[in-house]
Image (cartoon, rainbow, N blue to C red):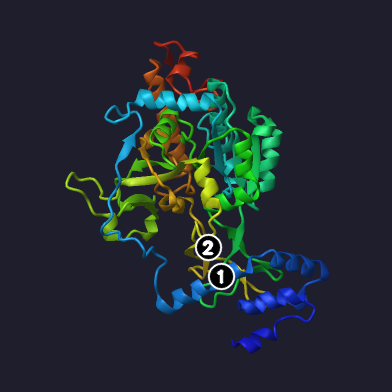
Amino acid sequence: MGTGMMRQLLPPDLPANLAGHLTAVGQEPVCANWAELDPAHRSAFVAQLQSLDWPLIGAMRQRVLAVRKHSEADRPTQFSLEQASTPPCLRLRDGGNPIPPAVAAARGTAALAAGRVGAILVAGGQGSRLGFDGPKGLYEIGPISGANLFEILCGKLVAVSRRHGAAVPLAIMTSSATDAATREFLARRNRFGIPEDRLLFFRQHDLPALNDTTGIMLRDAPGHIAMAPDGHGGMLGSLAEAGGLEWFARQGVDHIISFQIDNPLAMPLDAEFLGYHLLTDSEFTPQVVPKTDPAERVGVVVTSDGTTRIIEYSDLPAELAAARLPDGRLKFHAGSIAVHAFTRGFLERTAGQADALPLHMAHKAVPFIDGSGQAVTPTAPNAYKFERFLFDLMPLARTVTLVEVDPAEGFAPLKNAPGAAADTADHVRAAMVAHARRMLGRAGVMVADEIPVELAADRIIDADDIATCLPPGSTITEPQVIGT
């Protein structure tokens, strides 16, 4: 379709500035069904279009057209993977580290007790992939309690605050799809006891999906552009726009730890982890797990020529993903689990850099309406979605420290619907029960075979807390939640 023909699609009553934006970036076809809209829907459509970042959409369309022209994947080209290696890791609970675990734990404990640590919970995702209608954070995952992900992860912050006598300021990132329900749930539950002035909500941005051939924005209704959240990397820009970095500063926070809503075993405020971050003067400290299967869908941390970054699993060529070291480990074995510690100063510095987080493209099947207004549900990818990854900040950090955690103790992601090979609710619940049984064992409490147990997230951090509930030598013979 030629430019002149596309311009004929623009309705005469469209605001002049908006018509100029549409024409400048070749998006006139989105107005194809304008005549069918009543005044209220026209007004809403204009409001949505006026809210878009038109220079960014123009750049996104050029990316789509370039991929079509050159048939190139959206892979990093400025970094030689062949010359890269996995940087050394400090290991949580491992006596072989140059920094003794007890020393690290003491340093982290002091920071928590002084109120110098804040947290960001990334909770913009919906539960649609799980067959759940609502924010993923409301998905009930507790194997006995039925507690949802918000209850478990916010409960962990409450337990840390109670132990150290200092509140942990928490910012929760929502999305347009999850914001209202998340706020309502937290208010109904009285924020789990988190003081109102220590809780901040902020919302990530949405970006349009573009047709994979023309680069035209798809519509999911005659007067509405199909939008999707801009990825966990949208956290930084959205937090800065909401005044979140200043909010953390007013709270006395110097270090911020981000983590995601889908991992109920996450231990973002582990004192030893925080201590390694502090004692190494690190600006960016990710938790990693040892990757053993080349096909495992986690990004890996690599370093080359003094630069450290995370390469997404989809950007790692299969032959390099499978490459092994002489000792049998994968060459790239440090798998990222999206738990990151940052200095507040680092986030302030990078928030001011417009190009700090590049856009990544993902080829997806996106439902849309065609030019005649008919709904189409594609069975193959038909569009590109765009998102930013928070870990792309890593090359900008002056110092990076990797801390390896045992996946059995800190990584049980809820990703897939029942029936999938991994990362389903059944897998996560089994991991939570196994974790609880091990911790009870360390506290000298026996659990009868096949008996499920669960730890109350807002009460139990480690074996020391269990001792306040059950004396060593106790035996559990019935399913129960320890700490309630």
Instruction: Confirm or deny contact between disc 1 and disc 2 (CB under 8 A).
Output: yes
Of the 4 image quadrants, the one containing the C terminus is: top right
The reply, left or right, for residue 325 in relation to residue 190 is left
Find disc 1 in the rendering and name its residue.
210
Does residue 481 lie above or below 76 as drawn? Answer: above
Please report the residue visible at 56 percent of the width from the left and 70 percent of the height from the top.
Answer: 210
The mark found on residue 7 in the picture is none
Measuring from the top left, give residue 304's x and y in whole percent: 30, 54
Find the distance from the CA under tag 1 to the CA under tag 2: 9 Å
On screen, residue 321 versus residue 23, left or right, reads: left
The image quadrant of residue 105 is: top left
> Disc number at residue 386?
2
Identify the residue at image location x=32%, y=39%. Answer: 89
Q: Residue at x 48, y 18 (%)?
A: 465
Q: Position of residue 277 (x, y in %)?
A: 42, 35
Amino acid tagged 2: Phe
Q: Is residue 25 above or below residue 159?
A: below
Q: Residues within 10 Å of mark 2 (few under 14, many from 20)?
A: many
Residue 98's image quarter?
Answer: top left
Q: Residues within 10 Å of mark 1 (few under 14, many from 20)?
A: many
Question: In the structure shown, which secondary structural element does the residue marked by tag 2 occupy?
Answer: strand
Q: Residue at x 58, y 24 (%)?
A: 166
Q: Secondary structure at mark 1?
A: strand
Residues 422 and 217: in front is: 217
Q: Earlier in the sequence, mark 1 or mark 2?
A: 1
Q: Is residue 129 visible?
A: no
Amino acid type at circle 1 is Leu
